[in-house]
Structure formats: structure tokens, C-alpha cells
Image: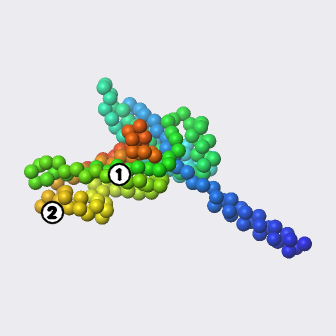
């Protein structure tokens, strides 16, 4: 009987481990808009708090604020990307009063811009597909303009060389846009630009 009890305990223990490892990680986003920057910063802080504290919490991967110009005012949009167990994320999305959805395959469109010796614009545009937002965000997270040009040099050497002007990149700028499932405007998640001035709207 002791051997049977021991076997049952081991079985339950292993079942518990398997059940935990089978809890699939999924990815999602929520976003909202405001007319003032201090208001949108408050919304960003609120997003992080509710995501991290919802039913033992999820992981905030990245937040980003975009500023766009409307007819009579500025519009600020904050987007938060997060990961967690499917059941928790699903229930979170169903009750939150914000735009949001699950994230599947992520497409990232890169546009590298510089000037040649005559002052004419050189463009390199390409799109890459990532299995999930966690991997896709690594391309831009904690990066600056210099690091983004190094990414081009490492991955597309010919295109990088085409941008060199007497050994330097003149007025180099990088625009990056993220899409969910398909690289179409209606599936656009957010965009970010890298110039010599550091972007401070992402965390």
C-alpha cells in the first residue's frame, strides 16, 4: 500500500508540473487616446498597474505613446503590449473599457532614410515577420538611432553601404511600424521614429 501511495503522489506531482508547463503564453494589447500629454501619461501608468495586478498579473512587455495632429488639437495614443495565460488575458480583454485584442503574427515594416552627396533622399524599405510581439519588440526596445543603423548593417549590408556618404550616414532616420497579422493600415499597432534625438515615448 505504501508503494501505491508513493506512486500516486509522484503521479500527481508530475501532473501538476505538466499542467503548469501547458499554460500557454498569449499576447495582447490595449490602447486609448487623450488630448493632453499628462492625461495620456496617467493612462500609461494605469495600464501598467491593472495589467500587472489582474488575477495575479500579466507581464507588461512594452508601452508606447504616439502624438498625432488633429484639426484643432493634438491627439495622444498610448498602447500597452502584454503577455500572460490565455484564460487570464481573455477575461481581462472582455471586461476592460479599452480597445484591445489578442496578438498573433507580427509584421514590422522598416524604412531607413538618409541623404546622398547631392542632398537627394535614399530609402530602404523592407518588412519582416515575427512569431510573436515579444520577439518583434527586441528589434526596437532600448534602441537608439545608432543601434537601428547597426541593425541594418548587420542584416542588409548592401543596403547599408548604399546609405554611406563619404563613410558616414547623412541625416539618417529610421521609421518602424508594427502590424498585427497583416501589414495593412487597418492592422497597424503603432509606429516609432529614430533620429539623432532620443525618442522618450516608449518604455
Residue nearest the viewer, comparing 24 with 98 = 24
Residue 160 higher or lower than 47, as above or below: below
Q: Residue furthest top?
A: 72
Residue 29 higher or lower than 71, as above or below: below
Q: Is residue 3 visible?
A: yes
In the rendered structure, the answer to whether residue 54 lies left or right of residue 121 reads: right
The residue depicted at 34 percent of the width and 49 percent of the height is 109
Q: Position of residue 26 (x, y in %)?
A: 55, 51
When asked about the image quadrant of residue 18, the answer is: bottom right
Q: How many discs mark residues in the rendered view?
A: 2
Question: Which quarter shows the N terminus?
Answer: bottom right
Give the residue at mark 2: 167
In the rendered structure, the answer to whether residue 83 lies left or right of residue 126 reads: right
Residue 28 higher or lower than 40, as above or below: below
Give the residue at mark 1: 127
Q: Label 2's element?
A: loop
The residue depicted at 33 percent of the width and 35 percent of the height is 68
Q: Label 1's element?
A: strand
Label 2 or label 1, whichever comes before in sequence order: 1
The residue depicted at 59 percent of the width and 36 percent of the height is 95
Q: Position of residue 145 (x, y in %)?
A: 28, 54
When asked about the image quadrant of residue 50, the answer is: top right
In the rendered structure, the answer to whether residue 23 lies left or right of residue 183 reads: right
Q: CA distance from mark 2 to mark 1?
A: 26 Å
Q: Is residue 171 visible?
A: no
The residue depicted at 86 percent of the width and 71 percent of the height is 4
Q: Position of residue 146 (x, y in %)?
A: 27, 58
Residue nearest the viewer, comparing 41 with 62 = 62
In contact (CB < 8 Å): disc 2 and disc 1: no
Which label belongs to residue 171? none
Amino acid at each position: 500500500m505504501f508503494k501505491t501511495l508513493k506512486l500516486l503522489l509522484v503521479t500527481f506531482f508530475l501532473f501538476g508540473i505538466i499542467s503548469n508547463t501547458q499554460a500557454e503564453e498569449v499576447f495582447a494589447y490595449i490602447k486609448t487616446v487623450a488630448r493632453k500629454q499628462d492625461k495620456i501619461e496617467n493612462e500609461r501608468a494605469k495600464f501598467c498597474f491593472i495589467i500587472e495586478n489582474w488575477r495575479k498579473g500579466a507581464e507588461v512587455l512594452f508601452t508606447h505613446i504616439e502624438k498625432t495632429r488633429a484639426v484643432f488639437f493634438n491627439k495622444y495614443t498610448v498602447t500597452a503590449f502584454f503577455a500572460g495565460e490565455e484564460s487570464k488575458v481573455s477575461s481581462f480583454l472582455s471586461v476592460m473599457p479599452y480597445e484591445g485584442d489578442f496578438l498573433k503574427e507580427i509584421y514590422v515594416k522598416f524604412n531607413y532614410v538618409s541623404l546622398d552627396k547631392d542632398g537627394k533622399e535614399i530609402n530602404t524599405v523592407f518588412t519582416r515577420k515575427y512569431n510573436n510581439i515579444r520577439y518583434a519588440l527586441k528589434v526596437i526596445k532600448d534602441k537608439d538611432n545608432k543601434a537601428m543603423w547597426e541593425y541594418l548593417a548587420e542584416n542588409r549590408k548592401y543596403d547599408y553601404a548604399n546609405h554611406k556618404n563619404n563613410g558616414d550616414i547623412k541625416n539618417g532616420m529610421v521609421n518602424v511600424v508594427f502590424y498585427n497579422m497583416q501589414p495593412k493600415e487597418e492592422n497597424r499597432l503603432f509606429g516609432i521614429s529614430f533620429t539623432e534625438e532620443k525618442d522618450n515615448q516608449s518604455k
